[in-house]
Image (cartoon, rainbow, N blue to C red):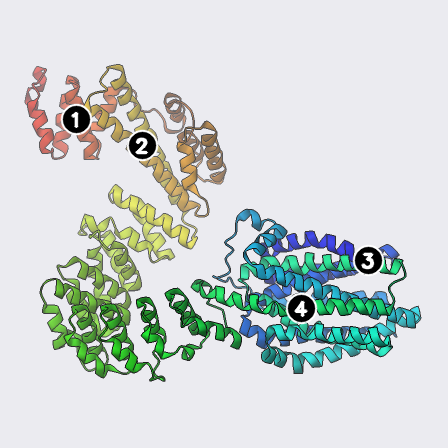
Amino acid sequence: TWVYVLIAVLSLFAARLNTRFVSAFGRRNSLITTAFLAAFGTVLFYLLEPTPAVVFGLYVWSGLLGSVLVVQFWMLVGHVFTVAQGKRLFGLLAAGGVLGAVFGASFAALALGDMGVRQLLVAAAFLFLLTGTFVTLEDVDAPDPVDVDPSSADDARNALSGALGLATDYPYLVRLAALIAISTAAVLTTDYLFKAYAAATRSPEELGSFFASYYAVLNTVALAVQIFVSTTLVRRMGVIGAFLILPGLLLLGGGATLLFAGATAVLATKGADGALRHSLHRISTELLWMPLPEYVRNRAKGVVDTVVVRGTQAAMALGLWALASVGSDDPATLAALVTGLAGLWLVVGIGLRRPYLDLFRTALAQPSSRGRLELDLRSVEVVVESLSSREPASAIAAMELLAASRRRRLIPALILYHESKEVLLHALEIVPMPERTDWVPLADRLLAHEDEEIRVAALEALARNGHADVVKSRLLDISPWVRSHAAFWLVANEPERNPAMDEDIQLLLDMPGSSGTAARMGLLEAIEASGDERWADLLLVLAESEEEEVAQCAVRAMTKVQDPRFVPWLIHRLGTRDGRSNVREAIAALGEPAFEALVGALRSEQTHPRVLVHIPAAVARFADLRAAKVLMDTLESGRSGRVRYNALRALVLLAARTQFRLDEEVLERRMLLELREHFHLLGLHHLVEDDLVAHGERDQGTGELLVGLLADKRDQALDRVFLLLQAAFPDEDLRSVRSAARASDPKRRAQAQEFLDALTLSAKAPELRPLLRLAVDDLAVTDRLRRVQDELGPQTRDLGEALQILLRDPDTSVSGLAAYHVLESGRSGLHQEVLAAAHQRPLSDSLRALLDSFSPPTKGATSLA
């Protein structure tokens, strides 16, 4: 009794730890680790002196191992196999368990003649090691895209509360847990009845050999049942029917013991339990879990198999102890208890059939979860019933479910009479097969449907399955879109016809107006769907269309057809805003020739600037080390600031996608350049802004514009620093750090500063960390500028010097605004600087007009006008 109570209490913690452990390390790795820990712990018990406390601990240890290892094993198995695979293979897997039991019991029975019981622990430890080693040889823990837990992170931290929360959404879980609790109580009482009978009829010295011999025989029978009977029973009787065989036999055995109270009835009752519990009963129990979504199964199963099972054992053991304490644990009372529990087991098990099927009905409303679902006969009946539903979602879900389970032939062709457009479109994708003919006249009928999309779908289904003769009638369809698809399939099904020279195709190309546009777009959609290289010449023709929507359709078709001749046109197309993402995708799909052409265009001085600025993003689509090197080189090149900025953004995306380790020295060098630029602009901005405030010139338009422009450029320089950091540390969320660095809250700014300081601890450039700290520091601007001189040397000292620097800035927007501001503010001493700056670059018309409008304030400035 107290062993079961203690195991139940410890199982509360084991369930939580096991869930976290499996989540963190994976099903396979967890099973390996637990097996090795089991070997280690078992050896420790062997080394201890066999006192009553040690024996008590050994029993608890074995009980916990039985809970955790079995749960981990079936979690792994449930992840690897589908329901249908489970029905075929779980019998074989359970047979392995029964074979192990036969071997273990037989080995113990034979070995006890030459060694003591204590030495069996060494053999057990060896078998644990062997098991763990064997599992390491199998790679069966690959990530599953449907294994996603949508529940909250808080629930995920607590296995018990999470399982209780799932019970609200899945009432089936409550029934299944109750059924497992009842079955646990029934088999424990049966086991107690058997052991009490053995203790009453045999001496203590005989018990060891009796148990070993009896279990060896019993497990041999169980192995035979497992290999020759269980799989057939599950297949013929279904999961629920197979699950109810054991309680039926226990009901008969308990009733016989209650009536006759003989040794035969007791041994037969225990024999039914021993022969079926670890074979047929184990298989059917595991299959009852399989219809549940995997994330539900993973979270709830660990709790049920530990907390519920062990808790039931503890409660039942306390009840048996209470019976024994008052002398009521006689065979008749125990047999009555077994009979009652087995009857309750049957009643609850029969009631589980409807919720079991309801899980498949629920799956019909969730198309995204059907990838691994396979159906038995009863479940197929439920799905086929849904095909007749007037609800489009139910009918579509049923079709997809049958298709996913490779039962497309069960979908009747009469589904093509359905009133819903969505159902008809799905049916025309799934039902048509070359080996079926019943759908052909119904699809032919749909060629005259009022909806042009359905006509096209029917046309495609017939053409793909060898019925191209009916396609010709659609060349005269009222819809140019339908006519284009008909023309495509007529050419596609005759390899000797040249698409670019075909008369029917030429009629579509020459068709004027909106009808011609629709026809050409329909033709391109058909080409895209086929991906046939025969259409490459025609694609080149259509790509030059002046109709923007036709050109965009051509880009999408090029992604599938993939001809190297498309590359120059696609690169040129990068200069067009609309559909640019599709252009990049098409370029990436073309592989090596496209990559080489992109690199050449990026390095060429002849590439149009509007195209050039978008090449880095296209290079990043290739997601390999070559692309990373090209983008890194672009950062260091003399290209325009916009090209380098786009290269940096592309590099950040590439690093996040590929986790490549980029050249840290290059990134740090760029960070230092951007930080210097940031502080340089910070000083200029500070001087110009202070001058405006000091002279009351806040209302001067150009002064405010200049201050705003400098502030933007200052912040952009720091933004580029964070982008470079993101490229260097793709696993970090530098965007939130940048947001914190801008926050008005000094605590958040300080947190950002500490994080950046720790992140750049290993930076090779010694000045990087102090400059970065100052960039996000909460200090006043004057204090930051004073401190930055220790790292960067003397900065701009006065307004005059600052304005001269701005007038010579290579950015014409900065130099132009600076010139306006000088002239508007009447700074005569800088007129010659404005004139000198004007000689270095062409003046805008507005700036030249402004220069001409100013009267020269001094004799030396006469030549200015």
Disc 4 versus disc 2: nearer the observer: 4
Residue 727, placed above or below residue 169: above
> How far, Cα to Cα, is label 1 from label 3?
94 Å
Under circle 3, the secondary element is: loop
Q: Which residue is mark 3?
A: 1
Alpha-carbon span between mark 4 and mark 2: 76 Å
> Which disc, if any, is residue 333?
none
Whichever of callouts 1 and 3 sits on the residue coming sooner in the sequence is 3
CB atoms of marks 3 and 2 within 8 Å: no
Disc 2 residue crowd, few under 14, some 14–19, many 20+, Cα 10 Å: many
- Would you name the residue on which mark 4 appears? 347
SS for tag 4? Answer: helix
Q: Residue 453 at x, y = what percent?
A: 25, 68
Earlier-in-chain disc, 2 versus 1: 2
Closer to us: mark 3 or mark 4?
4
In the picture of the structure, the residue carrying the numbered disc 1 is 819
Q: Three-letter amino acid code at disc 3?
A: Thr
Q: Quadrant of the C terminus?
A: top left
Residue type pointed to by label 1: Ala
Mark 3 → mark 4, Cα distance in angstroms:
28 Å
In the image, 555 versus 158, the foreground residue is: 158
Where does residue 315 sit, x and y in percent of width and height?
76, 57
Is label 3 or label 2 in front? 3
